[in-house]
Image: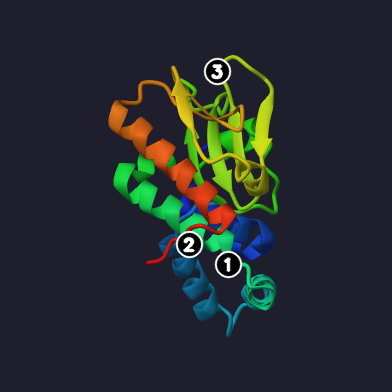
Amino acid sequence: MKTLTREDIDFMAVQNPEGFLQLYQRGIISREEFMAEVEALEKRASQDQSARDSLLSISRKLKIGQETESGKAAESAETGKPDQTEAIRKLCERFIAAFGEERFLLKGSALVRGLSLPDDEVIYLGHDDSLFHNGQCGFAITSGGIYCRMFAEKKVRHLTFDALGRDSTAHFIGDTLYSCGEPVAFISGADRELKDALIELIEAIQKIVKGEELFSG
């Protein structure tokens, strides 16, 4: 996939607002790029019908998304269950801040295809370990769980958070991190600090799923 230019983003914002919104939701464009484009649409809306239609479409989809998240939060409050996915998302954000966006913030679509990630899942963290960043191996943590593809394999392993919560530990064998008897991450050339941090991340997610710990801050 070629690198998106500003002209590409401008075109999608007007001609394909749903696709433009997905670029932002999947981390392919930053929040700053998304907001800059929305502001540009707002300026054009008074004289451009296409810009008005696109802006309205984006606003409606964002509102639906917000209402969905609000509904999930209300459901969690009613059942007494913590908002696990939000806590997991924050854990991933902290991990990315500590070890670098370039390595762990998924911005391209190659790994999305390589791991067959569903369109309706939000990606919290991703690492493409393939030599040419073509998505042939690596892992991702999404709102739907953890996906992992080993080197030179076509099979994609997927563990939901509930399944991951059945175990309470994780460990590395070579370049592969295992939990629940399954590979949950593949990363080559990682030093001890990074491996320990990945183990801690998975075990913290397991605690959240079990209700033992809710990440805050």
Name the mark on residue 82. Answer: 1
Name the amino acid type tagged 1: Pro
Please identify, in this view, whether the residue under mark 2 or under mark 3 is nearer the observer.
2
Depth check: give the residue in front, 82 or 21.
82
Query: Counting other residues with Cα less than 10 Å from the Cα at mark 2, is it few (<14), some (14-19), or many (20 or more)?
Result: some
Check the picture and name the quadrant holding the N terminus: top right
Question: Which residue is at a point 60% across and 54% down the rendered structure image?
Answer: 122
Query: Counting other residues with Cα less than 10 Å from the Cα at mark 3, is it few (<14), some (14-19), or many (20 or more)?
Result: some
Q: Is residue 213 above or below residue 125?
A: below
Q: Quadrant of residue 160?
A: top right
> x%, y% of residue 64?
70, 74
Q: Is residue 84 above or below residue 28?
A: below
Please say whether residue 60 is visible from this viewpoint: no
Find disc 3 in the rendering and name its residue.
151
Name the amino acid type tagged 2: Leu
Name the mark on residue 214. Answer: 2
